[in-house]
Structures are given as structure tokens and as C-alpha cells.
Amino acid sequence: MLAERHAGCKSEFTVAAAVVVLVLLLGIAFAGGYFTRDYVSRKRRVEARRWRGYTEPGWLNANPPANTNEIVPPATGELGQMLDRWESRARARRAG
């Protein structure tokens, strides 16, 4: 008798499990798409750099960290001088 009542119905747990599995598969598909897009873009950029003979400029040296208190050589050019003036004024304001 019990089997006759539930013969055509799926349990709520089975439906919920199927929805969870579908959401997981959808998430995996999106993650795979983003990974593939990133991989292809990186590969294309490397090939474009190689094709154009790209060399890294000397001023793009990321060795010294930006947040140190070490004395750095004075900046050149108008922008560098302006930034130096702003920094010295800020130091003077902090010192009081």
C-alpha cells in the first residue's frame, strides 16, 4: 500500500539533491570558463609581447617596496618635484 501511494512521486530530498548538484555543476562550468579565458588571454599577451619584441623598461623595477621609510633619490621632472613638495609639506604639517 505504501508503495502504491508513492509510486509516481519523487521525494523532496531527491529533488533538493538534484538542485544542489545542478548548482554545483553550473558553478564549476563558470569557474572553468573564467580559468580558460584567463589562460587564453595570458597566452595571447605573451605571444604579442614576443612578436613585438617587448622588453621591460628600466623604471619598472618592483624590487623596493613602496611603503618603506628609506630615503629615496630625488624625483626628476615636474611631476616628481611637485610630489616632493607635497611630501615635504605633509611631513612639516605632521611634525607641527
Image (tube, rainbow, N blue to C red):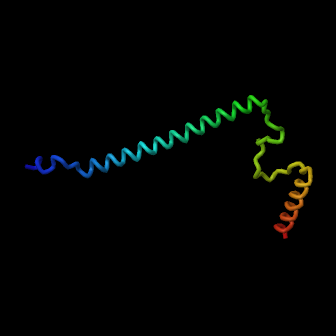
Q: With 55 as the anchor, is 39 left or right in this view?
A: left
> Which residue appears farthest toward the left when viewing the image?
1
Relative height, residue 63 to residue 54 (above, below) = below
Residue drawn at point x = 51 percent, y = 42 percent:
31
Where residue 23 sits: x, y (%)? 40, 47
Q: With 34 as the anchor, is 49 left or right in this view?
A: right
> Which residue appears farthest toward the front when viewing the image?
8
Q: Quadrant of residue 64?
A: top right
Relative height, residue 23 to residue 50 (above, below) = below
Residue drawn at point x = 66 percent, y = 33 percent:
44
Where residue 35 sits: x, y (%)? 55, 39
Depth check: 39 or 57 in front?
39
Relative height, residue 15 to residue 93 (above, below) = above
Where residue 91 sits: x, y (%)? 84, 63
Residue drawn at point x = 65 percent, y = 36 percent:
42
Residue drawn at point x = 15 percent, y = 49 percent:
6
| Number of numbered discs on residues | 0
Where residue 57 sits: x, y (%)? 82, 38
Depth check: 77 or 37 in front?
37
Q: Quadrant of the C terminus?
A: bottom right
